[in-house]
Image: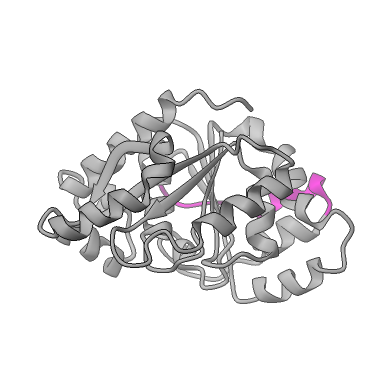
Amino acid sequence: MIITISNTKGGVGKTTTAVNLAAVFAEKNRRTLLVDLDPQAHATRCFLDEQQERSVGDLIMDKPSQAARSVYATGIPKLDIVPANADLTRTAELLSSRIRREERLWRALETIRDTYNEIILDCPPSLGILTYNAIAAADLILIPVQPGVGAVNGLGALLEAAGELRDEENIPYRILITMFDVRTSRTNAIFEEFLEEHRRRLLKTIIYKSESLNQANLAGKPITLFAPSSRGAFDYAELSEEISRLRIPH
């Protein structure tokens, strides 16, 4: 399954979810590939200390038959990564003049997808050509949303773009509530009202706000390595199980 993790709003736990979901899948003995599409490369730095010769920009711009050359081992068994770097901004500019530019990532991944059980795409916090490529390639679009004012801003634009790119009315998306704080009951109640129209697409798993996840992020490590017995590790294990049970055609 190709899982695209996207939200145009920053600071909602998007990369945290990509990194930890990938690590959990690998821990469950599922061959997993993490593709970092964010020029900030936060996901990449969780697994690689040095900049590699090739990156996701090469994966997108080269012939699909060359895709495997951009894949690197992370050091975690069963988990590989296609890294990002600052040159990815230039890649986005080059893509603008290419024919069928939204399909390039999908075409590259099709040549290697049989190698993996799960492929996770971490998007930049914007609706641009890189995110469009990830949406077009997705079997499932996972949208992390943090409770609070403006939590669902941009959700409509993201889903509208997905509908146009995929020429589908029934977009295969799910909403994941992240950074949930049980102490802010009033905010949570308002948040639930905003999400009412998407209730059928809400995942049951909730990623709770926790100090262990904060510390793991600061350390640049997956929660499964930093604090394997923590609430955060449990939440992402639950998320992996729920996603595995989804019936998403692909």
Seen from the viewer's position, the closer of residues 11 and 66 is 11
Residue 82 is at least partly visible in this image: no
Magenta-colored span:
63-76
Please indicate whether residue 164 sits to the left or right of residue 119 in the image.
right
Please indicate whether residue 81 sits to the left or right of residue 92 in the image.
left
| Quadrant holding the N terminus | top right
Please indicate whether residue 247 sits to the left or right of residue 129 in the image.
left
- Residue at position x 37%, y 62% in the image: 151
Q: Position of residue 239 (x, y in %)?
A: 33, 37
Q: Position of residue 130 (x, y in %)?
A: 66, 62
| Quadrant holding the C terminus | top right
- Residue at position x 51%, y 73% in the image: 40
Q: Position of residue 14 (x, y in %)?
A: 42, 58
Q: Is residue 238 magenta?
A: no
Q: Can you say whether 112 is above or below 189 in the image?
A: above
Tell me where residue 180 sits by quadrant.
bottom left
Seen from the viewer's position, the closer of residues 129 and 223 is 129
- Residue at position x 51%, y 64% in the image: 8
